[in-house]
Image: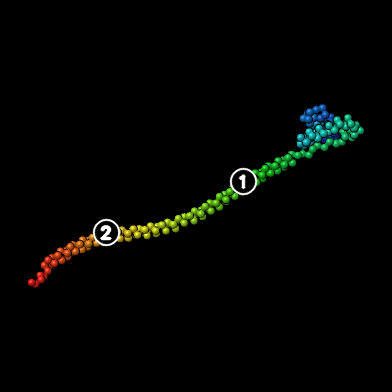
Amino acid sequence: MQIVKEGTPLVKQILNKDITDLFEKEKFQCGVLKGQKLYPGLDWEKCDKLALRTKVNRVVDRVKTLRKNNKSKLNVFLQSTFCFPENRSDKITFQYLQEEERNRVKDIERNAVKVDSENKTLKRQIKQSNLDLENLEIQIDHYERKSDVLLKLLSIAGEKCKTTKRIQKENRSWGKKFESISNQLDESLEQLDEMKVKFATLGPKKCP
């Protein structure tokens, strides 16, 4: 284990052996605190904790496996340098921003699809309204023409009624005249008959 003493430069690297000593029998957070004291020059705080925990567990598990199955490779592995995971804060922030942007784009796309669907529906409704309006205009024109014809027929019927009433009035007048003339004729015929009778009575007598 490399221990930093006062006045010595900060440690820039750590071995798998040191990682094993720190974390094999300690909880992860305790191992990190201990490592910060023993190796203050390393990226304990800067690196991604989840990635660090994963790498530490892999080292510890690898050491346990080599102790059981391949001790010849164990020393080589323990003396290998442990590489801290890269600082992912910027990457995570960038990924977060990308995710936010993707979500925003998806929202915009969904809204665009919704608006497009509403526009299509509105266009269909407007088209149908225009067709209904055209049909209504045709019906109005038809009924206007029909109304004109009916008004003309009504005017003609009115004139015919007036003519009929005038004829009926004339018929009644001629009927009265006919009746009067007929009565006069009857009287004249009666007078003629009377005159004939008188004439026959008063006619010239035969000589003896």
Q: What type is the residue that disc 1 sits on?
A: Lys
Disc 1 residue crowd, few under 14, some 14–19, many 20+, Cα 10 Å:
few
Residue 206 as seen in the image, left or right of residue 161: left
Q: Residue at x 51, y 55 (%)?
A: 134
Give percent across and percent down for residue 196: 15, 66
Q: Nearer the viewer, residue 135 or 102?
A: 135
**Snapshot quadrant of residue 153:** bottom left
The disc at residue 114 is 1
Residue reaching furthest to the bottom:
207
The disc at residue 172 is 2
Residue reaching furthest to the left:
208
Q: Nearer the viewer, residue 138 or 208?
A: 208
Q: Counting residues from the N terminus, which is met first, the one under dot 2 or under dot 1? A: 1
Q: What type is the residue that disc 2 sits on?
A: Arg
Between disc 2 and disc 1, the foreground one is 2
Question: Does the image show residue 3?
Answer: no
